Amino acid sequence: AEGGGPWEFAANATSTDPQSTQLLLDNGYRPGYTVLEMGLDWPAFEASLNRAQWPSGFELRPVTAEKAPAIARSVDEAYAGEYPGNRYRTNMNVADYAAEIVQPPFDPSLIQVAWNGDEVAGQVIPVIERGRAEIYEVSVRPAYRRRGLARALLTRALLDLRARGIGVVRLHTVAEFPSRARDLYETLGFRVLKEFPRYRKPG
């Protein structure tokens, strides 16, 4: 770790590779957290639309290069308390992130951003590549959670992808996030395809 603090070894193995998993366990590695790859079942999403509604107090605004820094700051703040003790969190370069989301392969017309007055409250950022979509980002600032905003933004993004004829939609999330993002995704029709435990061992 920086500054001579505690450090640890890191290794990865997927849920479909039991030999590698056992090798890591036999050598003292233990799961630190688990990344989930999820895929959208379109019929299940269609069935969820009767629960879709836009929460009051928020306004959608188009994404521009001038607004990108505010969006990046919102994403950064959204993850401030997700990893316990920030143990596994990677520090974001807000300026680089802001520049990234307004140039290919990102399409600003696909990005859904909710504002509360002059502040970005939450965002969903899809990316389309080679006919498939990845939900690159779903996040809501802590002050605006538990109002249905993430569901509303993600629903709008998926409707946009459906209108563009996208058949395959994937996203990744962390199983241990206290915001329980997995639960939201499952209610919208996403299903776990594969698990990627991130293994750690004290240095």
Image (cartoon, rainbow, N blue to C red):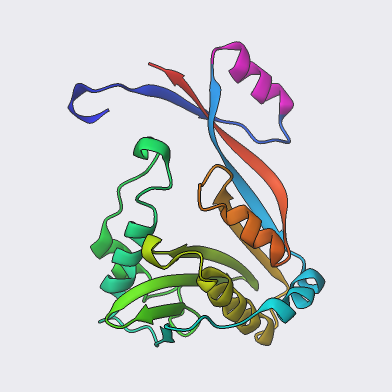
Magenta residue check for 21: yes
Q: Is residue 85 above or below residue 22?
A: below
Quarter of the picture containing the N terminus is: top left
Q: Is residue 7 left or right of residue 186?
A: left
Label total for image = 0
Magenta residue check for 117: no
SS assignment for the magenta stretch, majority = helix
Q: Quadrant of residue 190?
A: bottom right
**Residue 105 percent location from the top left of the image:** 46, 72
Work out whether residue 113 or residue 19 is closer to the camera in this orientation and state it. 113
Q: Quadrant of residue 194?
A: top right
Q: Quadrant of residue 181?
A: bottom right
Q: Kindly identify the residue that appears in the image at 28 percent across and 72 percent down.
A: 70
Residue 145 visible to the viewer? yes
Span shown in magenta? 18-28
Q: Is residue 136 above or below residue 128?
A: above
**Residue 112 percent location from the top left of the image:** 48, 79
Work out whether residue 148 or residue 39 is closer to the camera in this orientation and state it. 148
Q: Is residue 37 above or below residue 1?
A: below
**Residue 188 percent location from the top left of the image:** 69, 67
Residue 105 visible to the viewer? no
Quarter of the picture containing the C terminus is: top left
Q: Kindly identify the residue that appears in the image at 37 percent across and 64 percent down.
A: 143
Q: Kindly identify the residue that appears in the image at 64 percent across and 51 percent down.
A: 37
**Residue 28 percent location from the top left of the image:** 54, 13
Q: Kindly identify the residue that appears in the image at 33 percent across and 84 percent down.
A: 64
Q: Is residue 202 above or below residue 141?
A: above
